[in-house]
Amino acid sequence: MSASERDARESAHASESNQLLRALPPEEYDALLPMLDREHLQLKQTLIEANEPIRNAYFLRAGVCSMLADQQEGGTVEVGTIGHEGFIGIPLVLGADSSPYRVIVQIEGDGWRIGADALRRVVDERPLVRRLLLRFTQYFADQLSQSVACNRLHTLEERCARWVLMTHDRVHGDQFEMTQEFLSMMLGVHRPAVSVAMGVLQNAGILQYRRGRVNVLDRARLQDASCDCYRITQRERERLLGG
């Protein structure tokens, strides 16, 4: 490999937007990169269908995806979100080929697509990649468990602030789309309750919310308005995946 090629690869690794891929040693990243295809992720695009074979996994570089439990009594509920800190396709790493949950794009962006069989081979053949993906899987499981506690113990306004914070972490800038439809799925409530919760945060001068668009005005006060669940999951993320 020439010096210019080596410099180009090092630059690509250093500027990688997906935090899992950037956390890999350069040689592991180089080995994985030829298997990845860049894909624009459109709003509401379905990446994984519930109870159907998973054909591709995705390493998000920008945007946010939602894992949804459909056909619940009372409607669809979001059970988790994933952004540039992780990947879509956890069942493949755990030896499964499908999931009971549907995964859609909540905020459009882009990511790397890798075929299911290719990811399985990587996990089998490259222990460092397998270890990192399993650590993210542990973090995601912890996030889901914390959400169960959050839904049981904390007020709607606290939970709303937490979900806004989690989305804010995964986008560039202070403004992003967050429709009442998605917020109601995140919080497991009807849309009128979403309007009330967001109205409380808006009246406090913490954010603006108009026509499905959030503008975070005061991040510190948004964290104060959130429950401890946000800080707990952030500490776990840093423990397992780094800062």
Image (cartoon, rainbow, N blue to C red):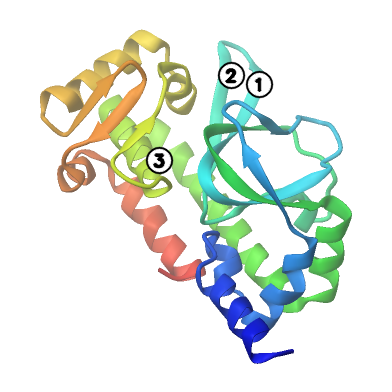
The residue wearing badge 2 is: 76
Is residue 180 found left or right of 87 in the rendered image? left
Residue 82 occupies which quadrant of the picture? Answer: top right
Q: Is residue 24 above or below residue 235?
A: below
Helix, strand, or loop for circle 2? strand
Q: Which residue is nearer to you in this view: 41 or 225?
A: 41
Question: Hey, what amino acid is under mark 1?
Answer: Asp
Which is nearer the N-term, disc 2 or disc 3? 2
Q: Position of residue 73 (x, y in %)?
A: 61, 12
Q: Is residue 223 left or right of residue 142?
A: left
Q: Nearer the viewer, mark 2 or mark 3?
A: 3
- Of residue 196 and residue 46, the one placed in the foreground of this image is 46
User: Which residue is label 1 attached to?
Assistant: 70
Q: How many residues crowd mark 2 within 10 Å: few (<14), some (14–19), many (20+)?
A: some
- Left or right, residue 228 beside residue 94: left
Circle 3 residues within 10 Å: few <14, some 14–19, many ≥20: many
- Determine contact: label 2, label 3, CB under 8 Å: no
**Is label 3 in a helix, a strand or a loop?**
helix
Task: Look at label 3 and name its amino acid.
Answer: Thr
N-term mark: 1 or 3: 1
Q: Position of residue 92 (x, y in %)?
A: 79, 52
Q: Report if the CB atoms under discs 2 and 1 are less than 8 Å apart.
A: yes
Q: Residue at x 60, y 31 (%)?
A: 42
Image quadrant where one finds the C terminus: bottom left
Residue at image coords 66%, 21% = 70
Residue nearest the viewer, comparing 48 with 155: 48
Earlier-in-chain disc, 2 versus 1: 1
Name the residue rendered at 72%, 67% in the picture.
33
Please tell me whether residue 101 is drawn above or below residue 8 in the rendered image: above
Name the image quarter holding residue 48: top right
Q: Which residue is mark 3?
A: 167
Q: Residue flagged by tag 2: what amino acid is it?
A: Thr
